[in-house]
Image (spheres, rainbow, N blue to C red):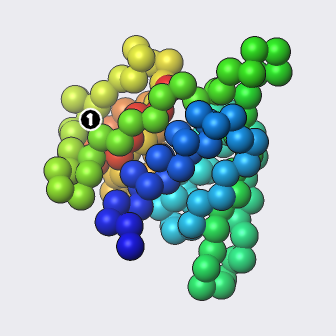
Amino acid sequence: MVTDPIADYLTRMRNAIAAKHRVVEIPASKLKKEITKILFEKGYILNYKFENEGAYNQSIKIALKYHPLTKQSAISDLKRVSSPGLRKYVPVSEMPRVLNGLGIAIVSTSKGLMTDKEARTLNVGGEVLCYIS
């Protein structure tokens, strides 16, 4: 049993990148699906596919993105910020900037999951889930 599914998601991605895998398979949940959609929209992953839609054992297959010449991953760092034992909530005035705007922070707000930049434009704060750069 996994006590922190988001940390498990990030760790599976981190391990797949370290091993230079092309595809990583992760157990699915609504939150993980939304994080995956954000990563795809921002260009951190190549593609994704939700397997076994509606079934009990759903999964997400994520195609990782690498530079064609240098074989460098598009994701250099994944960091969990808010954990089940220590939640990190921030108002819009204290919204973090990852790598001075080059990375993203995924924030869970009252208006759904979004990046730090989108939260600033909508003027909402929330729980900072993770940093991705």
Which of 117 and 15 lies nearest the eye of the viewer? 15
- The image shows residue 73, relative to residue 85, as above or below, that is above
Quadrant containing the N terminus in the rendered view: bottom left
**What residue do we see at 28% from left, 31% from top?**
95
Residue 61 occupies quadrant = bottom right
The residue tagged 1 is 92
Mark 1: few/some/many CA within 10 Å (<14, 14-19, 20+): some
| Label 1 residue SS | helix
Q: Position of residue 46 (x, y in %)?
A: 75, 39
Q: Position of residue 79 (x, y in %)?
A: 39, 36
Q: Residue at x 65, y 58 (%)?
A: 25
Q: Is residue 94 left or right of residue 108?
A: left
Q: Is residue 56 above or below residue 116?
A: below
Q: Nearer the viewer, residue 67 or 44?
A: 67
Name the kind of residue labelled 1 in the image: Val
Q: Residue furthest front?
A: 19
Q: How many marks?
A: 1
